[in-house]
Amino acid sequence: MDSKKSFGVSITDTNDFRDLSFLKEVLKDKKIVFLGENSHGVAEFTLLKSRMVKYLHDSLGFDVLAFESNAGDAYNANLNISTADVRTSIYNSLSSLWHVEEIVPLFNYIKNTHSTKNPLDVAGVDYLASNGSYSFSRFLYNLILPVNPSYAKEIKESDSMLTRMGVRKWTIGNILSKEEKDLYKSMNDKEILVYFNLIDFINKNEDKFQKKESQNIIAAKFFIQSRIELLHYSNRDSAYMANILPRKNLNMTKLIAKFRDYIMSQHLKFLTTALYPGKKIIVWAEDSHIAKWKYHLATDSSYYKSTYTIGFLSYSGKGCYVMSQVSENSNPERLIYEFRTPTDSLSVERIMHGSGYENTFVDMIHQTKCEGNSWMFESSKWTEWTGEDVSEEENIRNVFDGFILVNKITPPKYLKYDYEYLRKR
């Protein structure tokens, strides 16, 4: 691999960002940057992306950091980020996938920016209730309380049930009893009506909310609608999802995957148009969500031309991800996996490994084909998750704009939480 087409990047947390200065030219005129990861549960990805976020905010004017996490939860966590304990902010805003020690320094940085004229706001682009917090439930309660205290309590209890169940069994479902699970399933249709009625209540009583709540009202209605989408998704309501999606005639597996990513794209569009118009946004998500060939998140026509996608790859080592949360009756299930180093000659990982750097960034869209970079314009392969899932594309520049390869990955250190205490806060 031609070293002139690649750059070495450091994982070490330092305020010396000279190794990242090439991003100034690479990201010129870009307003949305996607930072991926080929698997969750990699310490080095979190450390390196945290450094990049700090540089993008401090030097390149990016003001919003949006995670692949529940948008309503993150919105409320951001409202309180300047006064909340850092670990509580992490719990309330992020999927449990990133409840790790390695992300604490970044959230310390974020909290500190909120006492300056240039805060870095935390947001979400997902609708899955994947961290078990009641952050959005508390947001709804605090919003409605001055207008109707009894209704505020009712909504908080109802929304908390949705959060408590979640959608993914690997996050919080294991702590539920069979009775609670049966109750949740029976409540889904009722819950949809609850949220429709809540939007109607807000519309009819909008004049009773304080003027300072105008943006919160806009956010509330959008995220409540997102709850409705979540319930249809968890019900596997194929007719509803097919009607929402631009593409039709999909089997159930593809329908579920594409519906989620389409709704995620709508969340990002909402950030760019309603909550943070004119702001530059960093999106932190898994590689398959930001790939330009698969879904909608990175390719929505309203912002596509101003985006830059960076896939994160690994060459060797071990990773780990949490499949459930701790409770009185269970411990979190943490799956350690050994990454399978690619051996195929077309492997992007093998090619980038020859750069001579410990960790390598390569830009692809600002290149012209020449000796040393022909792989960018021809058939290439790259891996996801443990290395078993192999993707191939005739021109990889149709999928990502740039890549970062971490040569050796290790599992993160997961934060220890008193979950029951946090859910009551």
Image (cartoon, grey):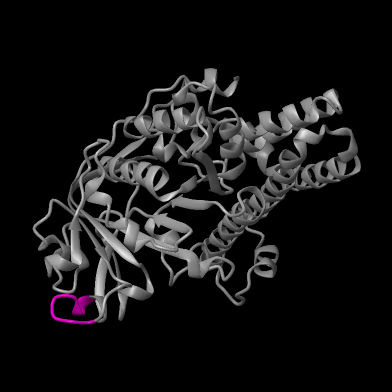
Check residue 30 for magenta coloring: no
Magenta stretch prevailing secondary structure: loop
Q: Position of residue 391 (x, y in %)?
A: 31, 69
- Residue nearer the viewer, 346 or 331: 346
- Tell me: 184 left or right of 91: right
Q: Residue at x 51, y 62 (%)?
A: 297
- Residue nearer the viewer, 46 or 107: 107
Check residue 374 for magenta coloring: yes
Q: Residue at x 52, y 40 (%)?
A: 122
Q: Residue at x 51, y 36 (%)?
A: 119
What is the quadrant of residue 309 in the picture? bottom left
What is the quadrant of residue 238 in the picture? bottom right
Q: Position of residue 146 (x, y in %)?
A: 83, 25
> Where's the N terminus, which quadrant?
bottom left
Q: Position of residue 258 (x, y in %)?
A: 54, 65
What is the quadrant of residue 357 in the picture? bottom left
| 290 relative to 64, above or below | below
Q: Residue at x 70, y 63 (%)?
A: 240
| 347 relative to 326, above or below | below
| 362 relative to 224, above or below | below
Q: Specify start and end residues of the magenta stretch as a single range.
A: 369-375
**Can see residue 291?**
yes
